[in-house]
Image: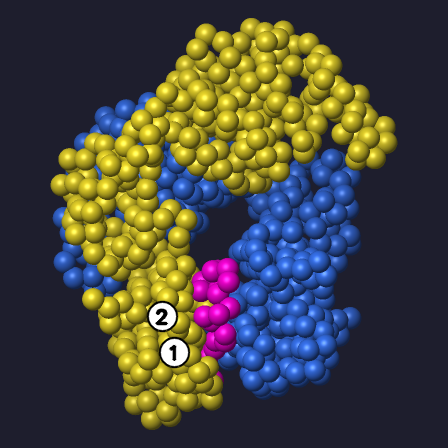
Chain colours: A blue, B yellow
Amino acid sequence: MTVELLSVGTELLLGNIVNTNAAYLAEKCASLGLSCYHQTVVGDNEKRLYEAVRLALSRADIVILGGGLGPTKDDLTKEVTAKVFEKELYEDKHTKERIEQYFRQMKSGKITDNNWKQALVPEGAVVVDNHNGTAPGLIIEEGGKTAILLPGPPNELKPMFEESIAPYLSSRQPEGIYSKMVKLCGIGESKAETMISDMIKKQTNPTIAPYAKTGEVHLRLTARARDEKEAECLIRPVLEELYRRFGRLIYTEDENVTLEEAVVELLKEKGYTVTTAESCTGGKLAARIMNVAGVSSVYKEGYITYSNAAKRKLLGVRKETLDDFGAVSRQTAEEMAKGAANAAGADAALSVTGIAGPDGGTKEKPVGLVYVGCHVKGHTRAEEFRFTGNRDKNRDYAVVRALTLLREELLAGEK
Amino acid sequence: MTVELLSVGTELLLGNIVNTNAAYLAEKCASLGLSCYHQTVVGDNEKRLYEAVRLALSRADIVILGGGLGPTKDDLTKEVTAKVFEKELYEDKHTKERIEQYFRQMKSGKITDNNWKQALVPEGAVVVDNHNGTAPGLIIEEGGKTAILLPGPPNELKPMFEESIAPYLSSRQPEGIYSKMVKLCGIGESKAETMISDMIKKQTNPTIAPYAKTGEVHLRLTARARDEKEAECLIRPVLEELYRRFGRLIYTEDENVTLEEAVVELLKEKGYTVTTAESCTGGKLAARIMNVAGVSSVYKEGYITYSNAAKRKLLGVRKETLDDFGAVSRQTAEEMAKGAANAAGADAALSVTGIAGPDGGTKEKPVGLVYVGCHVKGHTRAEEFRFTGNRDKNRDYAVVRALTLLREELLAGEK
């Protein structure tokens, strides 16, 4: 079965935003065993959108449209797709109630009239509830062709796809596609790929496809099988071989588990609490740990210490350390981690100090130089990194390296 | 003049990588006054690529192709485009020498035979040197249509575009397009659109297009004009009308300025320092402020106080306040903000306390209930919000609301 992605939005044509939705949907569709041969972006223009929908439906069995479902006049995806399928729009009572409820919860006062546009749906369409916004998703099936309409904001599109669209697409597949995601940290993509290049070449069922994420490598195993049990039998030996080669670098084989969840789980197993002391990452590391729902038993408090004075006051970093080695140094990172654990009364602590850029670099300490400190139960260690990205990328990499270091230290004591 | 972007690569169709090239090229083309109505992605497949090139050339004056110029058999962009233009390929001596020179510099030893494929160019094509790789860029012009072929790796494509393609495109433009982005905070997209629906309807030059961002609304004004001065004359009265209607809700008219930058700029103007005390946002607010390069004169330290004990210890929130009103309350938010300013010795402070979800909600205090506190120079205020998103979205909204509240308070004293 073939699928085609059609992203709608003038902001994509103008390059205001990067089309992360397309990459997300493409990866998900591939994992569901759908073949995708075209992705297209069009703007909020009726004629061109109409032509694009028709062309996509002529080429593929299923067309997934993202964007253009909002309340404004610019938003035309639903209207145009309904026209292609020659369907009238009618007001969906259930969706109208959901929009009312949404605004009640938001206490947004008066609902402006244009919002009701979002309650109009094409006749015969399946309405997919949006738990993170007002515009519902829609599935329109006719004459062997299917259009799936999703709201554009990624925090609405992604949960809707996971919850409703993926199961729907899976149910329409004639043969079963089963996939597993093996996630690694602490190794680069090209090294990981080299270590299993023979497997990637040899393997046909399951296939192995590497994906590079910031500071992580994900390996997707995709098997074609009659049922889950057969898929399990096909995947198991490949998985075992991956464990033989990568060992503890694999932090999960669960698609939905993130690195921060794996680390928090380890902390919970040990009954440890953790704290953070951040300079250049400025709260990003703490926020990442706090992504984990129910983290309150593990994480109680944390410190953002951008200035040297704050490093001394809140973490007890010694003046001599700052004077002799500088704020961006292995010694300062170690004292920050140790001091944070001490101040918070936590079993473990992570610290980050570095030069994220674009300014502040010198010949000895260039932009991208970052020290990550890790303290676990009396043992302190720091690592040096030299990142080559922009300010934002450098900080993201530092956060992943910090989590990876803590994971290593927590596992170090185990056999 | 119209341009269309055609990205070639199976890795894009599989979602292995995000199409950042398209966003980059789209923005550059928009800023050069080219109208772009379609972006397409196709894989390394001869038939589909041929069809895609033909279709793009039938719709646009200029087609920019990215990717598929490498040395492997998979790389077909040049061969297929030459076929569409009915051109033969011949070996370009200059390019062959450049490839030899490149490998000498890289000290890569033996050059594999397939590399010479990259020295083949279509007859009549302009060869564009690649200073960061082996595959040259190509410009093919015929019958009023132009195809521009660029190598796929961003570190080759971007410099080549800047150096050679942008000047070429600029020289071919008869008229100019000028655009301005007006950014608002503290108002929803549909309300903003309603307030200017007459303008959106009436305006043709410049046009006005609203974009919803998390907690923000951006309005893009796009004018067609002979030169920048004429564009300025067209845009100015519309801009003035927007200021009359939205007033201080407009935080910038500079495309590149973010809300956090606008807030930090205000703080700098006043010579104020700021700190943060976060519960449910767990560092996200601080990290957002820290996005601003050179923020160190304004932001020195911040607190993540997830537990009640931390709120008391680090911020001096009173036990009675927590007992009587709870951690998620207006009173606690106010004491957190005031206490943070005090602890950090800062002029201003923001606090966030709430129930981000998915768990922890009650009937009185449901998931999504968030209090944002703001303290500026002795004056403290808190606002209640009820968000309806998931954990991540609720936290993102809270961060924007906090920045918006601080901006309001900083402006409140001004006439």
Q: Is residue B308 visible?
A: no
Q: Is residue B335 above or below residue A142?
A: below
Badge nearest the viewer, 1 or 2: 2
Q: Position of residue A200 (x, y in %)?
A: 72, 39
For the residues labelled 1 and 2, the Cα–Cα distance comes to: 10 Å
Q: Chain of mark 1?
A: B
Quarter that holds the C terminus of chain A: bottom right
Classify residue B125 by image quadrant.
Answer: top right
Q: Amino acid at mark 2?
A: Lys
* Near-viewer residue (B73 or A338): A338
Q: Residue at x 42, y 79 (%)?
A: B346
Q: Which residues are magenta?
A: B287-310
Q: Position of residue B180 (x, y in %)?
A: 32, 42
Marked residue nearer the N-terminal end (1 or 2): 2
Q: Seen in the image, is A63 located left or right of residue B226?
A: right
Q: Is residue A402 above or below residue A88?
A: below
Query: Does the residue at mark 1 contact the one at mark 2 (Cβ under 8 Å)?
Result: yes
Q: Amino acid at mark 1?
A: Asp
* Near-viewer residue (A158 or A114): A114
Farthest residue to the bottom: give it.
B320
Q: Position of residue B354 (x, y in %)?
A: 36, 73
Q: Residue at x 48, y 76 (%)?
A: B302
Q: Mark 2 = which residue? A: B270
Classify residue B398 by image quadrant.
Answer: bottom left
Q: Mark 1 = which residue? A: B347
User: Does the magenta portion include B305?
Assistant: yes
Q: Residue at x 83, y 35 (%)?
A: B107
